Image (cartoon, rainbow, N blue to C red):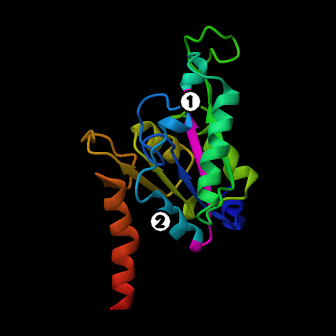
Amino acid sequence: MRMALFFMQNKGVFFDRDGIINKDFGYVSSIEQVEFIDPIFDICAAYQKQDYLLFIVTNQSGIGRGYYTENKFIELMTWMLNEFRKQGIEFSDYLWAPYFKDSDCDKYRKNSYFRKPSPGMISKLITEYDINPAASVMIGDQHSDMLAARLGRIEERILVSKDVCPSFDNFTHNYKTLNDFYKDKFLMADEDALG
């Protein structure tokens, strides 16, 4: 298993969606509800410049709850990714878990390995894109994001949250805001490089 990890060549950044890429107003499902979180475009561009592949892994129980359809979700994601594309940012892929254990729809009524905190979405992308998890990053705002990343063997796990349980240790770094993370990770690094 260690030999397999050694030969994985690509590094990736796995982003949660609601609460990291866009503000989480609860079951965001339309363009009118999308408010991108500053400085998400700068963060993605910085990682892309460092040759990371960019991914989104998002639980979408609103589908299983019947609040919106998978087609509606895909339409919104297509629009969102196009907004990034306008800034020269290309996501390699995105995955979603539409499941809800009490769903009225049999298709979505299950506890799926693909729903965070299980690592299914991350593991699938690692395999399909030849990602080295030891050189990769997860950025999320929920403890479930961090646990999924740890179970998926992602080395760097960034929790962006003001509310952190003291006994929770699945993240490697914690920031109160995405802007705090950006300043620390990229702006201060640039200043250090300049001397």
Q: What secondary structure characterizes most of the magenta part?
A: strand
Q: Is residue 141 above or below residue 65?
A: below
Q: Type of residue at label 2? A: Asp
**To which quarter of the image does residue 53 belong?**
bottom right
Q: Secondary structure at mark 1?
A: loop
Q: For the residue carrying disc 2, how many other residues have a C-alpha within 10 Å: few (<14), some (14-19), or many (20+)?
A: some
For residue 43, side relative to residue 49 (left or right): left
Q: Is residue 51 magenta?
A: yes
Q: Which residue is mark 1?
A: 60
Query: Residue visible at 40% across and 56% down?
Result: 38
Q: Is residue 113 above or below residue 47?
A: above
Q: Residue furthest left?
A: 166
Q: Which residue is mark 2?
A: 42
Tell me the magenta residue range.
49-60
For residue 176, side relative to residue 41 (left or right): left
Query: Residue visible at 39% across and 81% down?
Result: 190
